[in-house]
């Protein structure tokens, strides 16, 4: 793991922070920084956009430059995965520079800025995306098939997680919380009785993005899918996880009849995946949809509520997200009764 | 007995202040947070109205499901924990008489309070899933 600067808290001071970005720009591109601004979104990651020598860049780092949280990859590893994905022809932002400890801004890397939209409600509703929306599910399927065929032996060491491990982890969060959730218990029982085989696909464990959903795919009105972002949960595991997660009803943003992200059907998503050499185990993908819905439900009911109640984040917004657990309970019931 | 004005009327006054006076003067993240706060006030208003009846109905069904006599002293939290244990152990499942009906009703009740416009809830309503009863 990369060493953070000795005084990461000082980097929150905007003048010192800008001076450090400026130093990186001068060293790497021979020009000063301008138009530095923080991009909205990303509670778990900071993104800063700026211009240098007429080109736009985005610097991604852990909040306030601190060391990685328990789940997130070290920034240097994330950057190496992005480079491997780009080499495999996957639309990702190109990594331009991996920050060194001497840059004193914490674990971070710089990537080239890509123009596009990530806000789901705009992609799903705004007229300018009407032309590209019908093809999005196919573009997603094709991209994931290429991603899952990347040779993992050439990558730096990545965490491993599978269905049984994820189910155990989230069951643990729920049980620690003590608040009874009969519907979550029903889902946990169903999932533990229906675990996918360890090799749900002939190829076995693959590189998994781990957060493939609306919000992390960048879409342009001209070309549709132009980039896959937010790789910090990348791991080795069951590729069907990436086919299930975008179909979690909460990521459909009010378009439930279009199960893939609120923009497409499973059949076209899977067809495109197969068309690029991928192999779909539909029962396993379905398993991951249900596990994904349970995970988001437990994140709301347990993790969001706990950080609110403990005072770690006492905001109205955080507290209200806790109450979104019930939406996942109705969705889980509909899934378990085969009505979604 | 608490004096008047009633809690729901006071909540409605806060909601009006937020909507009519505060929100038009806010921008950016503060405006966003005010909208979230308004949603939370609406949840509380519905909870004050609906939760007492919902909880009585839930308690009655839990006693039936768990073979507790109607007169017995039992609280929602401990009965729900018992129910969770029985589901986790496999002793009760969707084939257990009354369980599916109970789980649907408690969940429909939560959505009626938390998010009555949620699409998954509206889809369930369209398929004639029973609403939480009120006693």
Image (spheres, rainbow, N blue to C red):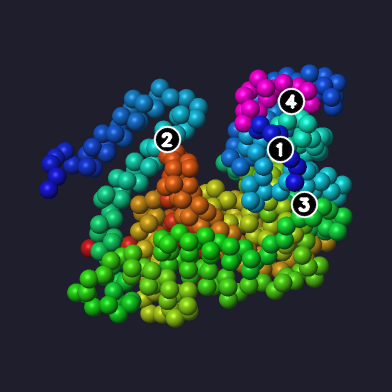
A329 vs A29, nearest the viewer: A29
Which type of secondary structure does the marked residue at label 3 adopt? Answer: helix
Q: How far apart are labels 2 and 4 at the CA level?
A: 35 Å
What chain is tagged by disc 1?
A
The magenta region covers A9-24
In the image, are marks 1 and 3 on the same chain? yes
What chain is tagged by disc 3?
A
Q: Are marks 1 and 2 in contact (CB under 8 Å)?
A: no
Q: Main secondary structure of the magenta part?
A: helix
Residue A290 location (% of width, % of height) = 57, 64
Foreground tag (1 vs 3): 1
Marking on residue A143: 3
Q: Are marks 2 and 4 in contact (CB under 8 Å)?
A: no
Foreground tag (4 vs 3): 4
Q: Are marks 4 and 1 in contact (CB under 8 Å)?
A: no
Marking on residue A4: 1
The residue at 35%/52% (across/down) is B113
Which type of secondary structure does the marked residue at label 4 adopt? Answer: helix
**Residue lying furthest front in this view?**
A6
Name the residue tied to disc 2: B35
- How dense is the environment of label 2, judged by Cα within 10 Å: few (below 14), some, or many (20 and up)? some
- The answer to whether residue A146 is seen in the rendering is no
Q: Is residue B99 left or right of residue A65?
A: left
Q: Earlier in the sequence, mark 4 or mark 1?
A: 1
Residue A112 versus residue B90 in the image, above or below: above
Q: Earlier in the sequence, mark 1 or mark 3?
A: 1
What chain is tagged by disc 2?
B
Foreground tag (4 vs 1): 1
Residue A17 versus residue B48 in the image, above or below: above
Q: Are marks 4 and 3 in contact (CB under 8 Å)?
A: no
Foreground tag (2 vs 3): 2
Name the residue tied to disc 4: A21
């Amino acid at each position: 793991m990369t060493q953070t600067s000795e005084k990461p808290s000082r980097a929150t001071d905007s003048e010192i922070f800008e001076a450090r970005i400026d130093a990186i720009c001068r060293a790497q591109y021979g020009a000063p920084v301008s138009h530095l601004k923080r991009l909205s979104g990303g509670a778990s990651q900071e993104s800063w956009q700026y211009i240098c020598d007429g080109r736009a860049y985005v610097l991604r780092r852990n909040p306030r430059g601190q060391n990685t949280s328990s789940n997130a990859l070290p920034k240097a590893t994330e950057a190496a995965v992005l480079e491997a994905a780009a080499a495999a022809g996957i639309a990702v932002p190109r990594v331009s520079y991996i920050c060194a400890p001497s840059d004193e801004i914490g674990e971070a890397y710089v990537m080239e800025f890509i123009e596009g939209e990530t806000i789901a409600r705009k992609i799903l509703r705004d007229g300018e995306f009407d032309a590209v929306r019908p093809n999005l599910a196919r573009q997603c399927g094709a991209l994931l098939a290429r991603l899952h065929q990347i040779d993992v032996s050439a990558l730096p060491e990545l965490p491993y997680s599978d269905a049984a491990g994820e189910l155990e982890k989230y069951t643990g969060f729920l049980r620690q919380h003590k608040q009874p959730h009969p519907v979550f218990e029903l889902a946990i029982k169903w999932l533990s009785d229906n675990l996918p085989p360890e090799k749900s696909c002939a190829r076995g464990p693959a590189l998994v993005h781990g957060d493939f959903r609306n919000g992390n795919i960048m879409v342009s009105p001209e070309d549709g899918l132009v980039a896959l972002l937010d790789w910090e949960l990348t791991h080795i595991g069951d590729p069907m996880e990436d086919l299930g997660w975008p179909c979690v009803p909460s990521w459909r943003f009010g378009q439930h009849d279009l199960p893939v992200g609120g923009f497409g059907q499973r059949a076209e998503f899977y067809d495109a995946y197969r068309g690029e050499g991928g192999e779909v185990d539909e029962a396993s993908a379905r398993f991951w949809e249900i596990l994904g819905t349970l995970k988001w439900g437990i994140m709301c009911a347990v993790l969001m509520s706990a950080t609110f109640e403990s005072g770690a984040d006492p905001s109205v917004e955080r507290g209200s997200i806790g109450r979104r657990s019930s939406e996942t309970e109705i969705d889980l019931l509909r899934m378990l009764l085969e009505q979604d | 007995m608490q004096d008047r004005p009633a809690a729901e009327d006071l909540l409605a006054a806060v909601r009006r202040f937020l909507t009519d006076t505060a929100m038009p003067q806010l921008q950016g993240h503060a405006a966003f947070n005010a909208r979230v706060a308004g949603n939370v006030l609406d949840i509380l208003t519905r909870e004050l109205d609906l939760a007492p009846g919902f909880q009585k109905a839930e308690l009655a069904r839990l006693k039936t499901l768990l073979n507790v006599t109607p007169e017995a002293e039992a609280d929602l939290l401990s009965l729900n924990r018992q129910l969770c244990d029985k589901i986790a152990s496999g002793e009760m499942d969707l084939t257990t008489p009354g369980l599916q009906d109970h789980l649907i009703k408690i969940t429909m009740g939560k959505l009626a309070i938390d998010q009555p416009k949620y699409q998954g809830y509206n889809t369930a309503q369209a398929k004639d899933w029973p609403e939480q009863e009120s006693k």
